[in-house]
Image (spheres, helix red, strand yellow):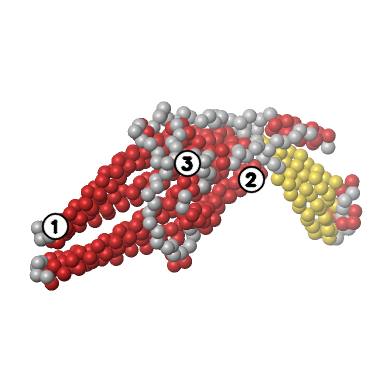
Amino acid sequence: MMRATHGIALALALLAAGCKVGPNYARPQAPTAQKFKELAGWKPSRPRDGIDRGAWWSLYNDPQLDTLERQVEISNQTVAEAEASYRQAVALIGEAQSSLWPTLGVAPGVTRSKGGSGASSSSFGSSGAARTQYSVEGTASWDLDVWGKIRRQVESQSAAAQASAADLGNAKLSAQGALATAYFEMRGADSLAKLLTDTVGEYQRSLAITQNQYDAGTASRADVLAADVQLQSTEAQLVAAGVARAQDEHAIAVLTGHAPADLTLAPAELTNDVPVVPVDVPSALLERRPDIASAERTMQEENALIGVAIAGYYPDISLTAAFGFAGDPLSKLFSAANRVWSLGASATETLFQGGYTVASVKAARAAYDAAVASYRQTVLTAFQQVEDELSDLRILQQQAAAEDTTVESARHAVDVTLNEYRAGTVAYTSVITEQTALLSAEQAALTVRQSRMVASVALIQALGGGWQAAELPGPAKEIALPLP
């Protein structure tokens, strides 16, 4: 037993001092800029620094939106799927860590045997007598992680779990952004319906004016028909506006985990306030974007798998041990005379496998290089998205000012032309022309306002919302095995 104890101690010492083959991970450099190009000439409208950045939608100060957004993390099924994937990734860490420990077992048995005639039968007692032998044996086997293959697997699974946690954050941010976008598009449809309803009222008054002019003999029947056609056309647009509104409401229902039939939102107009979070320096994106964090963690996952592949060059070393009792009768089984034990060690080295290990290492290195390229492309895409939304907001703000001026001019032109028609100095076609121009300008102004709200949501998403890389779980610690 002393030799067995010394053998186990030696194995533990060898394992504790074992190296980990393969490269240690170091984060590659990512392409970054000193500043955002589109920040020049762009100013956020009414920034609010004091809000909870986790609930980034509170920027919009909309209680209805806040209620809906808080349901995403609870009920959205895409988020639930990502959360389940994260729990699976965490479980795989424990699965990989279990290989660091020995496997223990117990094997009770009963053997019934019968010896034949002759001298050899003396070992069984009298000739032809049957004998029962009982045994209880504990077994242990241990694959020593001398080269760090298992520890590299744990490292890889730990990085994969962190990447999955970042994917979960990205799923939440994407669903929250999609919900906010659908919400503001729905409010845009509500405002369009309000605009068309008001316009229908104005066209009804215009129709009444032409009818009165016709009854007085100062207008033709054609003026009345033209005013009626214009009214009916606008009423048709009002009906059609409900299509987009219904689709947006259905999308919101699904994003919050409800069937479309279970959610009804009262109409409300689109806000004029377009708040935007202050834009950080470009390098902050590396910590604020969950997709970048996921891509970076994937690099470490693939880097660790290089070590797993390189370990294939080295022999597998394992220990086996058994201790138990074997004998008869059962009542005296657990006695010193019936004690049996064994201890063994083995090493297995593959001499020829047709270049499998070489190919595996090359494949692992290529997968790591692909992960590095994916990481850098993710960073570049993030910068592009921020620049796009900054330019959209800057240009849309300028366009909104121009559209507002156009609406005011068009509204004044309608008033003047309608007064001139009443005075009999212009034909009614001039009134229709100016009214059509006004409605077109008002619709364009509303579209720009809606686009600004959607662009502000997209900018917040591009900046990572309220997500931070510090939210990632810590890496799984390697199991420390104490020496005896």
Element at label 3? loop
Residue 392 picture location, percent across and down: 33, 41
Q: Quadrant of the C terminus?
A: top right
Q: Is residue 85 left or right of residue 387?
A: right
Q: Residues within 10 Å of mark 2 (few under 14, many from 20)?
A: some
Q: Label 1, on which residue?
A: 420
Q: Residues within 10 Å of mark 1 (few under 14, many from 20)?
A: some
Instruction: Indicate the amino acid at tag 1.
Output: Glu
Q: Quadrant of residue 375?
A: top left
Identify which residue is drawn at 9% across, 58% down: 425
Identify which residue is drawn at 82% across, 55% down: 134
Q: CA distance from mark 2 to mark 1?
A: 84 Å
Element at label 2? helix
Residue 114 picture location, percent across and down: 81, 59
Identify which residue is drawn at 90% across, 53% down: 332
Q: Label 2, on which residue?
A: 94
Q: 416 and 147: which one is in front?
A: 416
Asked whether residue 89 appears in the rendered view, the answer is: yes
Q: Label 3, on which residue?
A: 48
User: In terms of sequence position, does the residue under pointer 2 or pointer 1 come before the other?
Assistant: 2
